[in-house]
Image: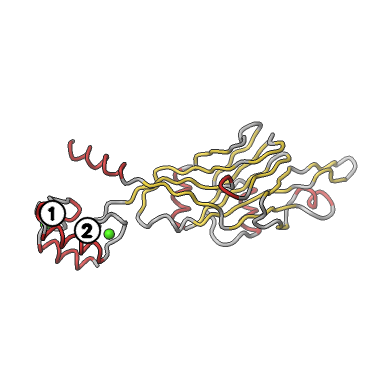
Amino acid sequence: MKKYLLVLLLSNLYADTIIIYSEESAEFYASGDGQSGCCSPGFFGSFNQSSLSTRHCQWWSQYSQCGVSAQYALWRFDLTDIPENSIIINANVLAQGGGNWIQSFMSISDDTGSISIDMASYLISGGDWSLYGQGVITSPVDEIIPHEIINSSYEGGQFCLMFRFYDGYITNYGVNAPRLVITYDLQNIMGDINDDGMISILDIVDLINSILNENLGYIEIADINFDNKIDIFDLIHLTELL
Ligand SMILES: [Ca+2]
Ligand SMILES: [Ca+2]
């Protein structure tokens, strides 16, 4: 029990938060004749602009005319700055903007690669997870990303996001631009004495120091052969892990 509490305490101590801004963003809009030219997006524009606008389509079938053509906005975020062997504790999407946000839509996916028609079409159809409805999304946005999606995005290295409002925009520059706030913990790896998520020469140096300097005490993660002592045999094992 005591040991369990200590591990819990340590894992809280080492939890870290990273804020990730988008790697690429764009508007995805409909253009052309007829209902599909009004309501089915097929073109990209406004890449990485300081504000991205979105609106829902209004097709007047009785006149065969387009009142307002559809426009979505999407982003992709590079997750490769999150250290290897992390356990993601929580992740949120933050964003803000203005205009008319009634009947808002938001979707996310773990797609990889640059912004593409496939990526955007998948997000329009709901992606891996979506929100839609009257008043469900308001500015400032602060939505929790479901665990399985942030985990698969972390594995694949990228997270994608889409918004569509009735007629509104998202601020896309500076600290208020769309961003992911991710809290993670580095997994305890046997021999990772400096707790940086990997085994390296730095851990060897730390282990030699603690062997030479006995008053540093017992370090569980350095006791690689599990004999409750930190000594030359752990050093031999650690060298093998390099
Ligand atoms: Ca290390
Ligand atoms: Ca040992």
Which numbered marker is on residue 211? none
Left of 41 or right of it: where is 240? left
Q: Nearer the viewer, mark 2 or mark 1?
A: 2
Q: Quadrant of residue 103?
A: top right
What kind of residue is marked 1? Answer: Phe
x 89%, y 40%: residue? 62
Q: Circle 1 is placed at which residue position? A: 226
> Measuring 28% from the left and 54% from the top, which residue is drawn there?
195
Label 2 C-beta lies within 8 Å of the nearest ligand 1 atom = yes
19 relative position to 25: left or right:
left
- Rendered location of residue 47, percent (x, y): 67, 58
Q: Say which element carries label 2.
A: loop
Quadrant assignment, res 165: top right
Report which quarter residue 226 is drawn in: bottom left
Q: Position of residue 88 (x, y in %)?
A: 40, 47
At horizontal 71% and vertical 38% (from top left) the residue drawn is 99
The x, y position of residue 20, in whole percent, is 50, 51
Q: Quadrant of ligand 1?
A: bottom left
Question: Who is closer to the viewer here, 160 or 40?
Answer: 160
For badge 2, the amino acid type reads Gly
Mark 1 Cβ and ligand 2 under 8 Å apart: yes
Which residue is depicted at the point 80% across and 41% down? Answer: 58
In this rendering, position of residue 156 left or right of residue 6: right
Look at mark 2 in the image and give the residue it sits on.
191
> Which residue occupies the foreground of this view, 236 or 216?
216
In whole angstroms, how far apart are the C-alphas of marks 2 and 1? 11 Å
